[in-house]
Image (cartoon, helix red, strand yellow):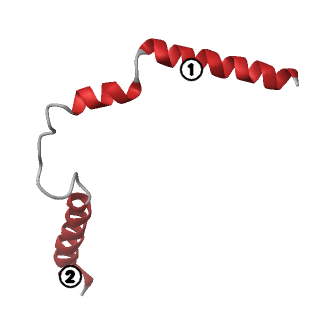
Amino acid sequence: MDNERAPARTVILASLLCLAIFSGCGQKGPLYLPDDGTGEEVAAETGTAQDVADTIEQEEEDRKVLDAQ
């Protein structure tokens, strides 16, 4: 009995495996290319390297003051 059902089980299990693998792949909906200005907007939001360095220095000074208290 079980030997007769083995090919059917194999097909069902392979189908379920394929369904599980392909159901979670990538972005939903149509693919698109981002606008040309996207990179410039991100660079403007993050600031310059000097701004980041100044922020880090300020945070280190703040930590020293808090540790001294």
Is 47 situated left or right of 25 in this image?
A: right
User: Depth check: 17 or 67 in front?
Assistant: 67
Q: In the image, which is nearer the foreground, mark 2 or mark 1?
A: 1
Image location of residue 11, percent across then percent down: 17, 71
The residue indicated by pointer 1 is 55
Is 50 situated left or right of 32 in this image?
A: right
Give me the residue at 80% from left, 26% from top.
Answer: 66
Q: Earlier in the sequence, mark 2 or mark 1?
A: 2
Residue 5: mark in rendering:
2
Q: Secondary structure at mark 1?
A: helix
In the rendered structure, are the residues bearing label 2 and label 1 in contact, judged by CB atoms less than 8 Å apart?
no
Work out which residue is located at the far right of the displayed protein and give it.
69
Image location of residue 3, percent across then percent down: 22, 79
Image location of residue 2, percent across then percent down: 26, 83
Residue 68: mark in rendering:
none
- The relative height of residue 12 versus residue 49 in the rendered view (above or below) is below
Amino acid marked by disc 2: Arg
Amino acid marked by disc 1: Thr
- The relative height of residue 4 versus residue 63 in the rendered view (above or below) is below
